[in-house]
Amino acid sequence: METKLTAQQRYNVRSTFGLMEAPETAEIPGLAPGLTGVPPCDNTYVFDAERMRQLTMFWVGGFKALLIEGDPAAGKTSLIEQWHARLNVPLYKVPCSPTTESFRLIGQLLPTEDGKLAWKDGPVLKACREGTSVLLDEYNTLDPGEATALNMLLEGYSWTIPETGETILPAKTTRFFATQNAVDSKAAVAGRNIQDVANDDRFSYMEVDYLKPELEEALVLRHLLAGKVDKAVAEQISRICVKVANNVRVAFRQDAPGVDKPLSTRVVLRWAKYTVMYQSVMKAQNRSGLHYAIRQAVRMSAAMAGAVNEQITAVAGYDEDMNS
Ligand SMILES: Nc1ncnc2c1ncn2[C@@H]1O[C@H](COP(=O)(O)OP(=O)(O)OP(=O)(O)O)[C@@H](O)[C@H]1O
Ligand SMILES: [Mg+2]
């Protein structure tokens, strides 16, 4: 069913995105609450000022398509999702894969109960009609030939459905977002394609890096405090986990031996939570919960586990057996 758009509504940047450095009166246009397809709000989400500025310029500048690139779990998908959640704009998220065919995105003829065929809009066409947004997740896993089928719509041109003859003119507020891990990222992710130049050319571009340390720390802290962890303990764990993660990211980028991938925000969050859970059990055995928990939080090669262990010891000030 087509989402009927309610009235436009303007949202104050400071109060809506928790961004205190924004000018007091700055506003971003969104929609009145209550539409289906709006992602749920994650109240622990932290908005970074620079990412917000870039996204705002894209949004208010009347641009149509934005490609977001960054390392695994840097925060690409969640940024777009939480942006829409706060502005109450429906977002149709489509996971792309090498076997995703363009008709799954655009639409197709499907059999009806009475044995006839009827056209059914895919998420891309649905957003074009409604003026809502589509997120094509892991876009560069899509076959370049299939991606090319989207070119006209990405640019806002009218488009005729060959099967029905109906012509669709994308609504002005329709926006396309594509997220992907860079093909040339050091955290090489298998199975990524390079889309053809014509397709690439239609997208504005934004790079998303891991959060700044103070923001990532605030995020981990919020998660721990939400789990009723003692404040002093939560602060200490957040500080150590984020510091270690950033040291490991630097080591990874500098090709340090054994460090074959960065520690993502996703892993840091899991690590901090496991640390809280294991800490007292491990302490009773005179062992470090921090060192133990990282191995439950993520699979690492033996060499990487060794390198990360050393980083934890250096930052925490004690080793696996609690020796300082
Ligand atoms: N700014 C942030 N505030 C709160 N949580 C964040 C933030 N950035 C990332 N996260 C958390 O980190 C995890 C990974 O984020 P997300 O899924 O957006 O990454 P991604 O870049 O899309 O990853 P992938 O490349 O694996 O698709 C999520 O659990 C998300 O909630
Ligand atoms: Mg993602």
Image (cartoon, grey):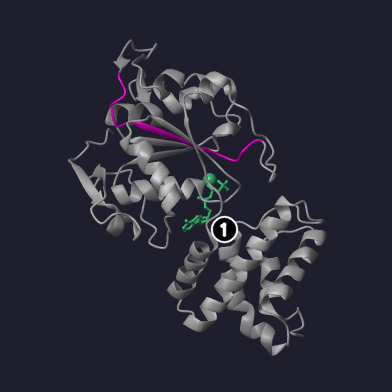
Inspect the image, locate mark 1, and give the three-letter code of the amino acid beneath it.
Arg
Q: Quadrant of the C terminus?
A: bottom right
Frontmost residue, 36 versus 169: 169
Is residue 162 rendered to the left or right of residue 33?
Answer: right
When the figure is inspected, residue 166 is found, relative to residue 303, above or below; the finding is: above
Pinpoint residue 156: horizontal percent, then vertical percent. Answer: 36, 22
Q: Which residue is mark 1?
A: 266
Residue lying at 30% horizontally and 53% vertically, measured from the top left: 13
Pinpoint residue 267: horizontal percent, then vertical percent. Answer: 61, 60
The response on whether ligand 1 sits within 8 Å of label 1 is yes
Counting the numbered discs, the total is 1
Is residue 119 rendered to the left or right of residue 231?
Answer: left
Q: Which residues are magenta?
A: 169-183
Residue lying at 68% horizontally and 68% vertically, measured from the top left: 294
Most common SS among magenta residues: loop
Residue lying at 72% horizontally and 81% vertically, measured from the top left: 318
Is residue 97 rendered to the left or right of residue 79?
Answer: right
Frontmost residue, 55 versus 9: 55
Q: Is residue 178 magenta?
A: yes
Frontmost residue, 116 versus 92: 92
Is residue 38 rendered to the left or right of residue 78?
Answer: left
